[in-house]
Amino acid sequence: MANLSAYQSLLVPIDDFLLCQTPTAWLIEASKPSNLPMLLIDHMICELKAAQTAAWLIRKYAVDEQSATVLLAWLAPYENFIYRKEGSLADLAQQQQTISKKLTLRKHCLYGEDLVDKMVMLIKEELHHFYQVLEIMTQRQIHYQSISAGRYAKGLMGQVRTHEPAMLIDKLICGAYIEARSCERFARLSPYVDDDLAQFYISLLRSEARHYQDYLKLAQQISADDICERVAIIGHTEAELIQLPDTEFRFHSGLPA
């Protein structure tokens, strides 16, 4: 079994940040061979959604129109694969070399450089993870199929306020929870799956742990007030979503109903 010991120091702050652990019932459900295709497909889609969110933040808050177009072009091959079933593993292998931090910031954007630096790195890593999951699916002869979205992300976004900069701050906090939960699930799921998949999940821990911290740092940097209250409010919603019964099995779903 892949060894988690080298990553324990990364997991301590994540366990402190999250208000609950993933229930054992979900881990047992996720480990069933019949659920492996759904687990991998939804994981791959989550990687794209994470990259899309980061690109949306950069486009909305930090860069000019030309750079916004560049960001959309980065995502297009992956979106075409998911939404139009166009392209292949070989096609996507060529895409990741085109992503860089050479974007043009808008004038008078106080936090734009830091936002771009952190989010571009996140986009690169999430799209690489997308490719890795698709590679695993291909090796295991699991074919991609369209699936409906779970309730997790939508439930979190229901807490986002509608005025600025509160909207941006809350979206960043939601991003932190999604990344932290992903990291926690990879770690807790690793003993329940085969060694190759466990090793892959453990390899993702370092980047996922950094992503959640980057989101939180940006949220506090942008906020004029301490964000602890908002972190707590969104955290309670996140814990409820994880612990309440869920009729659909997904990577971020709650207790199996």
Image (tube, grey):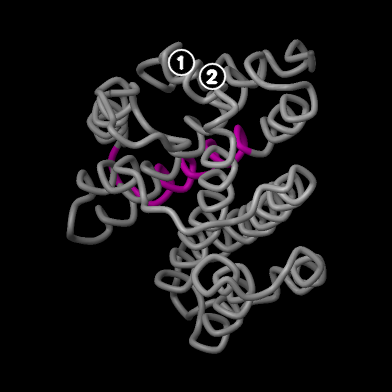
Left or right position of 230 against 20: left
Residue at 68% across / 13% down in the picture?
8
Q: Which residue matches tag 1? A: 16
Tally of marks: 2
Question: Could you classify mark 1 by the number of other residues whose Cα lies within 10 Å: few (under 14), some (14-19), or many (20 or more)?
Answer: few
Identify which residue, 31 or 45, lies in the foreground: 31
Q: Is residue 24 above or below residue 132?
A: above
Is most of the magenta stretch helix, strand or loop? helix
What kind of residue is marked 1?
A: Asp
Magenta stretch contains residue 212: yes
Question: Could you classify mark 2 by the number of other residues whose Cα lies within 10 Å: few (under 14), some (14-19), or many (20 or more)?
Answer: few
- Percent x, y of residue 49: 48, 56
Q: Quadrant of the N terminus?
A: top right
- Percent x, y of residue 69: 54, 85
What kind of residue is marked 2?
A: Pro
Left or right position of 218 against 95: left
> CB under 8 Å between callouts 1 and 2?
yes
- Percent x, y of residue 240: 25, 25
Q: Secondary structure at mark 1?
A: helix
Specify the segment rendered in magenta.
208-225
Identify which residue, 79 or 101, lies in the foreground: 79
| Residue 244 picture quarter | top left
Q: Secondary structure at mark 2?
A: helix
Q: Is residue 12 above or below residue 30?
A: above
Residue at 59% across / 34% down in the picture?
36
| Residue 121 picture quarter | bottom right
- Percent x, y of residue 183: 57, 30
| Residue 198 picture quarter | top right
CA distance separating discs 1 and 2 = 5 Å
Q: Which residue matches tag 2? A: 13
Magenta stretch contains residue 63: no
Q: Is residue 82 above or below residue 102?
A: above
